Image: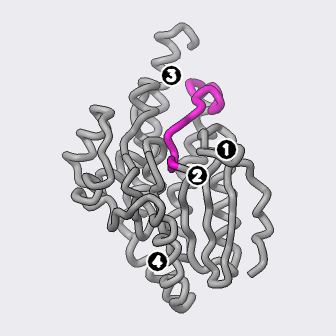
Amino acid sequence: MTEPAYASSYENFAFTRDEDGVLVLRFHTNGGPVVFTGRTHEDLPAALEQISLDRDNKALVITGTGDSFMDQIDGPSLGEIFKPAAWEKIRVEGAKVLQRLLELPLPVVGVANGPATVHSEYLLLADVHIASERATYGDQPHPAFGITGGDGLHVVWEEIAGTARAKWLLWTGEQIDAQTALQWGVVSEVLPHERALERGIEIARTLAARPALYRSLQKQTLNLNLRRRLVQDVPFGMALEGLTAADLAYQNGAG
């Protein structure tokens, strides 16, 4: 299988694809654990669109680098998010990422290879989600920044883990380990760290072997409710998040 045409197009995504059509998207920064930035936020919708249009892709695995899925974020790189035009850019990009993950015409396997305390919803939106024993889950940036978690976390965690658990996690800023995530039904399997990615690719190969139309229509069938919730509730959640960002800037004298 040839290397994807977009393999070197994005600074925070590394791509490999095997002969079975399994594409692995690995988040990284300079070859190490990713630091999520405004560039990452802007590039991800475009990358997912290219993945969607590439007929050589039969299944997708998303994972991180080293011992972390995603647990660092460069807040200032997101821009002046307290200003309406800047926030609208972030809102549009954020909504596109979530919707495109669900609209890909192929199954997605999420592999939490370590802490997933930034954008854990990417993993929860996967069709199959497995975790390394070193994985942890939570919402680190929003409580730290003092803004609400309305960018999809509120929807996805509620749908996957239930309302009470989502409220506890997003109110308190606490984290859960992989075994707790398994008990909550957030992940399907917890594996030794060195085995997690291998297992994710193994599952993806099984799914990639299914007929193309089946893969696409099964994807739609099993994500109907999540897709409705994202379309209905993420715009409102992000509007509220933008208000808290503006209020924070005002309180700090930046507004």
Res. 100 mark: none
For the residue pair 43 and 2, the one nearer the viewer reads as: 2
Q: Which residues are magenta?
A: 67-83
For the residue pair 240 and 201, the one nearer the viewer reads as: 201
C-alpha distance separating marks 1 and 2: 9 Å
Question: Which residue is label 4 attached to?
Answer: 203
Question: Which residue is label 3 attached to?
Answer: 246
* Residue 56, image x, y percentages: 69, 80
Question: Which residue is label 1 attached to?
Answer: 29
Three-letter code, disc 1: Thr
- Prevailing SS of the magenta stretch: loop
Image position of 230 (left or right of 47): left
User: Where is the N terminus found, in terms of image quarters?
Assistant: bottom right
Q: Residue furthest bottom?
A: 211
Crowding near the residue tagged with mark 2, few <14, some 14–19, many ≥20 C-alpha atoms within 10 Å: some
Which residue occupies 46% across, 33% down? 141
The answer to whether residue 111 is above or below residue 119 is below
C-alpha distance separating marks 1 and 4: 26 Å
* Residue 92, image x, y percentages: 59, 46
For the residue pair 96 and 14, the one nearer the viewer reads as: 14
C-alpha distance separating marks 4 and 2: 19 Å
Q: Callout 3: helix, strand or loop? A: helix
For the residue pair 69 and 44, the one nearer the viewer reads as: 69
Question: Which residue is label 2 attached to?
Answer: 65
Crowding near the residue tagged with mark 3, few <14, some 14–19, many ≥20 C-alpha atoms within 10 Å: many
Which residue occupies 42% across, 42% down? 236
Numbered disc in front, either 3 or 1: 1
User: Where is the C terminus found, in terms of image quarters?
Assistant: top right
Three-letter code, disc 2: Thr
The answer to whether residue 11 is above or below residue 228 is above
Q: Residue furthest left?
A: 164
Q: Are marks 1 and 2 in contact (CB under 8 Å)?
A: yes
